[in-house]
Amino acid sequence: MKNNQQNGNTTFLWLLVVFALLLFTVWYTNSPYFNFGKKDPTPEEEAALIAQGEERIIEITNKGFVPEIVEVHTYDTVTFVNHDTQASHWPESGKIDKDSSCEEFGSPQALNPFDQYSYVFTRAGSCNFHDKLFSFPFGSIQISDN
């Protein structure tokens, strides 16, 4: 009787291990860390993808980013244009608390009035951004695969 109970416990543990591995596999293959079957494009392929992409404009005004939420596809270009005639602005990824959930981007310098900064997104995800010089304007870019 004791052997049957031990065998039952062993079987249960193995089933639990298999189930845990199955759950992990499903999670991992749906996570951004999994890249099965996808290879990074060559520089030539990437240039072609960028050329086919669209451009979205985010205006920076004295009231913030317009629009605040933008939806794009991978290899689309997002251009920030400073339309605030009174102040410089500095768009960068992440929230003001430095939490970033996407590839990092940001203008290499503050944008004076009518200056612009462009960035091409190559990975799907959700990117929060803010103005490095001011605490109030925030925005989000949702990037989906083509």
Image: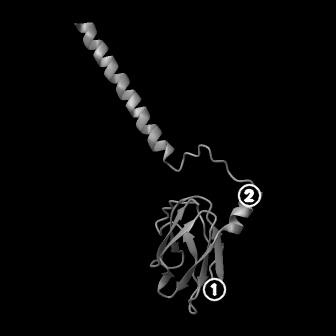
Query: Is 75 placed left or right of 5 in the picture?
Result: right
- Is 111 placed above or below 140 here? below
x 61%, y 70%: residue = 106
- Is 63 placed above or below 122 here? below
Q: Secondary structure at mark 1?
A: loop
Q: Quadrant of residue 84?
A: bottom right
Q: Nearer the viewer, mark 2 or mark 1?
A: 2
x 55%, y 45%: residue = 34
- Quarter of the image where the N terminus is located: top left
Q: Quadrant of residue 8?
A: top left
Residue nearest the viewer, comparing 26 with 81: 26
Q: Amino acid at mark 2?
A: Glu
x 56%, y 92%: residue = 86
Query: Badge 1 is on which residue?
Result: 112
Of the two numbered discs 2 and 1 on the same chain, state the one appearing first in sequence: 2
Q: Quadrant of residue 43?
A: bottom right
Query: Is 109 placed left or right of 128 in the picture?
Result: right
Q: Position of residue 3 (x, y in %)?
A: 28, 8
Q: CA distance from mark 2 to mark 1?
A: 34 Å
Residue nearest the viewer, comparing 89 with 76: 76
Q: Position of residue 146 (x, y in %)?
A: 59, 60
Which mark is on residue 18?
none
Query: Badge 2 is on which residue?
Result: 45
Q: Position of residue 40 (x, y in %)?
A: 68, 51
Q: Amino acid at mark 1?
A: Asn
